[in-house]
Image (cartoon, helix red, strand yellow):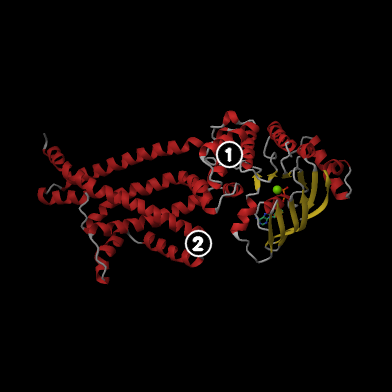
């Protein structure tokens, strides 16, 4: 067996373990919380009172306008100077959540706005309240349109979790770095890490396609036909 | 049973309804006719409060609500009146992510909190009535316009509204598809469903309307029994309008 293959196989265990214990939970949790934040921000921007709209616009402006790595450093290394001390994992989780919240809020705002106004009126006309119309009529249709852009965000997030290595989270990329530190084989290990990220993204893309097919079965908005 | 008293509706400086008063008896069909932009749709939407009148009083059955300029109607009151009505839209507006029967069940399950089984039974009976039971599980996107509109009628009827409001229910449809919708509405009328419909379709109006309200520039120009008003309009303006519609329809012009 060639040396490089042997090294890759030996490293696979530690890398997959790090992916399982840190990369995956970090991705899933921050995406879930990020979507909740994003939905809240989107609803405030669309329907909220002016002062609150200003606050959330400021939030989106900051988190979309500054590098994710800088945000993570600020939370993990910067906040302790202000008396807020966080462990590496929660710091990363907060950073990624706020970042996803900012990006997804723009997507969610756009797709909610893309549902034809007549759908609101149809929902009201059978007696629904605003929140019933939102939950039962608008969000399901908006959700379908949101799948491609939100999948993009999700796949980016999987890869971006490697940035957490820089604030000492022992996720997959950091596991690779550690092995490099003892084997002095950066090319082999970083290629392996890259391949593993590629594999994860590919699985997610395939899932996205299946989800889109499932959601497309009803044929989308009816407006175009009428 | 339905009373509109001195309804005024402004959009900014544009006064679209200028003190409209109409009384609609239970079990009658009232056609709203008149030139484009006359305020027919706005008047219908003021009955189910998709538009809130600027001033005036609305009564449906036992429920009454008065509007005053600058005063916001409480959403509870709006709901209370709106639930007395059902609405059929020009472009159907079925929920595309629900099947035909789910569309009809939606108001029963979500708003009236019926158990799903009971709602399904009623929905199926209504689909039967509009001749769509065989398509109960179809997605709206797979239905023709006429079929979509018939499902939409069943959806509007599901919560047993006191009045069915129809805004040009046939004007997005080809003539033969329009006919199937006219037939369904005619059947409902003969069963005593109270209806108010805005329409340019003389065939629809003369077939099923008892009463006609001629609305122009936000004012009721003439109103009365359909038979006599169509045959023998009193006002010059109404005469000319009806003649134009007849001419358009005979020459196969757009409805
Ligand atoms: N949401 C709105 N904002 C501003 N103006 C409006 C709005 N809705 C309707 N209008 C105006 O109100 C007037 C009456 O419109 P409405 O749609 O009620 O007429 P209509 O009689 O239904 O016409 P049509 O036969 O073309 O359907 C029009 O001048 C229209 O521009
Ligand atoms: Mg109209």
Separation (CA) of disc 1 from disc 2:
32 Å
Q: Is residue A54 above or below residue A145?
A: below
Q: Residue at x 40, y 54 (%)?
A: A36
Closest to the observer: B148 or A109? Answer: B148
Closest to the observer: B57 or B19? Answer: B57
Quadrant location, the C terminus of chain A: top right
Q: Secondary structure at mark 1?
A: helix
Q: Is residue B145 visible in the rendered structure shown here?
A: yes
Q: Taking B245 as reference, is A141 left or right?
A: left
Q: Residue at x 77, y 35 (%)?
A: B252
x, y percentage for residue B212?
A: 80, 45
x, y percentage for residue B2?
A: 73, 51
x, y percentage for residue B17?
A: 74, 57
**Badge number at residue B104:** 1
Question: Which residue is the site of mark 2?
Answer: A48
**Does the numbered disc 2 mark a residue whose Cβ is under 8 Å from ligand 1?**
no
**Does the numbered disc 1 mark a residue whose Cβ is under 8 Å from ligand 2?**
no
Q: Is residue B144 visible in the rendered structure shown here?
A: no
């Amino acid at each position: 067996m060639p040396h490089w293959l042997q090294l890759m196989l030996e490293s696979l265990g530690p890398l997959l373990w790090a992916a399982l214990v840190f990369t995956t939970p970090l991705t899933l949790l921050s995406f879930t919380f990020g979507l909740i934040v994003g939905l809240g921000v989107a609803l405030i921007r669309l329907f909220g009172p002016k002062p609150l709209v200003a606050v959330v616009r400021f939030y989106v402006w900051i988190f979309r306008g500054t590098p994710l790595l800088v945000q993570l450093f600020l939370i993990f290394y910067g906040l302790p100077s202000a008396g807020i001390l966080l462990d590496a994992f929660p710091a990363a989780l907060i950073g990624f959540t706020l970042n996803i919240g900012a990006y997804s809020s723009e997507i969610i705002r756009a797709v909610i706005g893309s549902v034809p106004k007549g759908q609101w009126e149809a929902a009201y006309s059978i007696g629904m309240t605003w929140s019933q119309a939102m939950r039962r009529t608008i969000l399901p249709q908006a959700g379908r349109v949101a799948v491609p852009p939100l999948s993009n965000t999700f796949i980016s997030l999987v890869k971006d979790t490697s940035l957490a290595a820089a604030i000492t989270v022992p996720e997959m990329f950091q596991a690779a770095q550690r092995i490099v530190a003892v084997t002095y084989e950066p090319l082999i290990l970083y290629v392996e890490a890259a391949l593993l990220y590629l594999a994860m993204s590919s699985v997610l893309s395939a899932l996205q396609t299946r989800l889109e097919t499932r959601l497309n079965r009803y044929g989308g908005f009816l407006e175009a036909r009428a | 049973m339905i009373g509109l008293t001195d309804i005024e509706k402004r959009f900014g400086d544009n006064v679209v309804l200028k003190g409209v008063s109409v009384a609609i008896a239970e079990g009658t069909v009232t056609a709203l006719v008149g030139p484009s932009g006359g305020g027919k749709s706005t008047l219908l939407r003021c009955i189910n409060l998709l538009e809130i009148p600027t001033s005036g009083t609305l009564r449906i059955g036992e429920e009454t609500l008065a509007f005053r300029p600058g005063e916001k109607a409480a959403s509870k009151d709006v709901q209370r009146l709106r639930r007395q009505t059902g609405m059929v839209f020009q472009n159907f507006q079925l929920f595309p992510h629900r099947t035909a029967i789910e569309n009809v069940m939606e108001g029963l399950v979500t708003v009236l909190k019926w158990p799903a089984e009971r709602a399904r039974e009623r929905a199926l009976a209504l689909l039967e009535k509009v001749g769509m039971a065989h398509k109960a599980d179809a997605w709206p996107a797979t239905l023709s316009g006429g079929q979509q509109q018939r499902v939409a009628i069943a959806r509007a009827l599901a919560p047993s509204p006191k009045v069915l409001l129809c805004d040009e229910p046939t004007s997005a449809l080809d003539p033969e598809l329009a006919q199937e919708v006219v037939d369904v509405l005619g059947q409902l009328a003969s069963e005593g469903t109270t209806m108010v419909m805005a329409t340019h379709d003389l065939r629809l109006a003369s077939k099923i309307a008892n009463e006609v309200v001629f609305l122009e520039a936000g004012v009721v120009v003439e109103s009365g029994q359909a038979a006599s008003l169509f045959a023998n309009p009193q006002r010059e303006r109404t005469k000319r309008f009806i003649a134009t519609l007849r001419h358009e329809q005979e020459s196969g012009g757009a409805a």
